[in-house]
Image: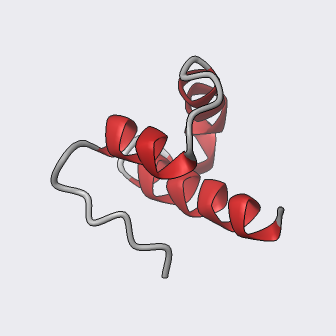
Amino acid sequence: YTMGKLMIRKLRDDWTASRGGRNAWKQFHDAFLQYGGPPIPLVRRAMMGSGDNGSLF
């Protein structure tokens, strides 16, 4: 569970960095939840685009 939590936080931070930071958290959660329940790396690729390396750290 902890690894998933860290992956989601990293995705949130990366996704919102160019969208207003903490002000974009609601938009992030809405976008994240619309993907349903696939593995987080697949959601990350869909949200961040193919240029993202998917690195957790």
Q: Determine the residue located farthest toward the front in the rendered image.
A: 38
Relative depth, front residue between 9 and 20: 9
Provide residue 45's location: percent of width, then percent of height. 34, 45
For this orientation, the residue located farthest to the right is: 1
**Corner quadrant of residue 2:** bottom right
Measured from the top left, where is residue 31 in percent x and y?
A: 53, 24
- Coloring scheme of the render? secondary structure
Q: Residue at x 71, y 59 (%)?
A: 4
Q: Is residue 51 left or right of residue 56?
A: left
* Residue 10 placement (x, y as % from top left): 56, 63
- Residue at figure coordinates x 63%, y 38% from the top left: 25
- Height in image: 43 above or below 27? below
State the residue at coordinates (57%, 31%): 32
| Residue 36 x %, y % | 62, 22
- Where does the N terminus fall, quadrant-wise? bottom right
Looking at the rendering, which quadrant does residue 27 occupy?
Answer: top right
Farthest residue to the bottom: give it.
Answer: 57
Taking the image as shown, residue 18 lies to the left or right of residue 52, namely right
- The vertical placement of 24 against 45, above or below, is above
Q: Is residue 7 left or right of residue 46?
A: right
Q: Is residue 18 above or below residue 34?
A: below
Q: Give the residue drawn at x 54%, y 23%.
A: 35
